[in-house]
Image (cartoon, rainbow, N blue to C red):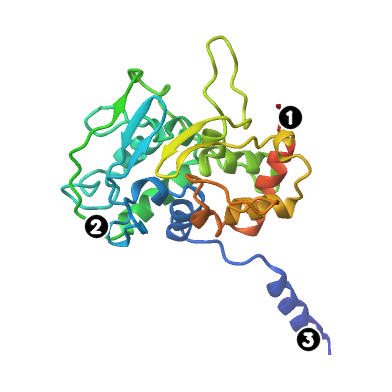
Amino acid sequence: MGQVFVTIALLLALLAAPSRAETQLERGRYLVETLAGCGNCHTPRGPSGPLKDKKFAGGEIIKHADFTAVTPNITPDPESGIGKWTDDQIALAIREGRRPDGKLLGPAMPSRFYRYLADEDVKAIVAYLRSVPPVHNSITAESHYDTPLPASWGPPVGHIDMPPKEDQIAYGKYLAGPAARCMDCHTEPPRPGESARLGAGGKEFHGPWGISVSANLTPSGLGDWSDAEIEQAIRTGVAPDGHKLFPPMPFAAYQNIAGDDMAALIVYLRSLPAIE
């Protein structure tokens, strides 16, 4: 009888144990396809939406008030993509916005946020990009910036750890910052002499839909939205009153955000200082 109880106890312990950790490739897929939504910028669009045969092949034109960016090919194609780049060169382009030839990558590449990606996540992204099908797509158009780019986006990036998932605010901040870049789109560039109004929206985006303006994600903007309504807006692009939200919010990618990540993200948004 004692042996039976020991066996049952072991089985219950195994069932209660956390599930097997995701592999590096699975984590990379989740980051690239869902949280970072890389295809939202790096997959060109046709009249009917993203071109499936040119996934991550670049050539999409992103227009803002002060620049026009042409996205590069991030597939492993050796001629038109990143097939000849080393892992360190790809990581440098992601984190510090610098190509192997030394040229700086400008907006809309959010290197100012990606520089805070954890080491393990950068490695996972690189591994996944290595695994996607190579697509030859030579891009001749060049990006244009009204304001010259700086010499760099900051000092060289050192070691960065992942914040613990148990700390929902810290992990939610990581998701809203370097991982999903919510604060990149929802924070208007500060005026001279003023500090950035983090998460308060107001940033303009120009596209086939016209001009969209990012929403205020602070408690002043979210108002009395419930957690479920915030989640619905993020996953489906539908506001509580039923109206559809505009691009470039990558709803198609965000619909697959893991439940615990979504919960942490909402907890973090709730913690932001309210900004009118």
Label 1, label 3: how many angstroms apart (C-alpha)?
Answer: 59 Å
Q: Amino acid at mark 2?
A: Pro
Q: Amino acid at mark 1?
A: Ala
> Is 271 on the left-hand or right-hand side of 202?
right
> Could you say where residue 226 lies in the image, as x and y percent from the top left?
76, 50
Residue nearest the viewer, comparing 230 with 110: 230
Residue nearest the viewer, comparing 267 with 207: 207
> Disc 1 on helix, strand or loop?
loop
> Is 159 on the left-hand or right-hand side of 168?
left
> Could you say where residue 46 lies in the image, as x and y percent from the top left?
31, 54
Q: Amino acid at mark 3?
A: Gln
* Residue ranking furthest to the bottom: 1
| Quarter containing the N terminus | bottom right
- Mark 1, other Cα within 10 Å: few <14 / some 14–19 / many ≥20: some
Q: Which residue is mark 3?
A: 3
> Disc 3 on helix, strand or loop?
helix
Q: Which residue is mark 1?
A: 274
* Residue ranking furthest to the left: 79
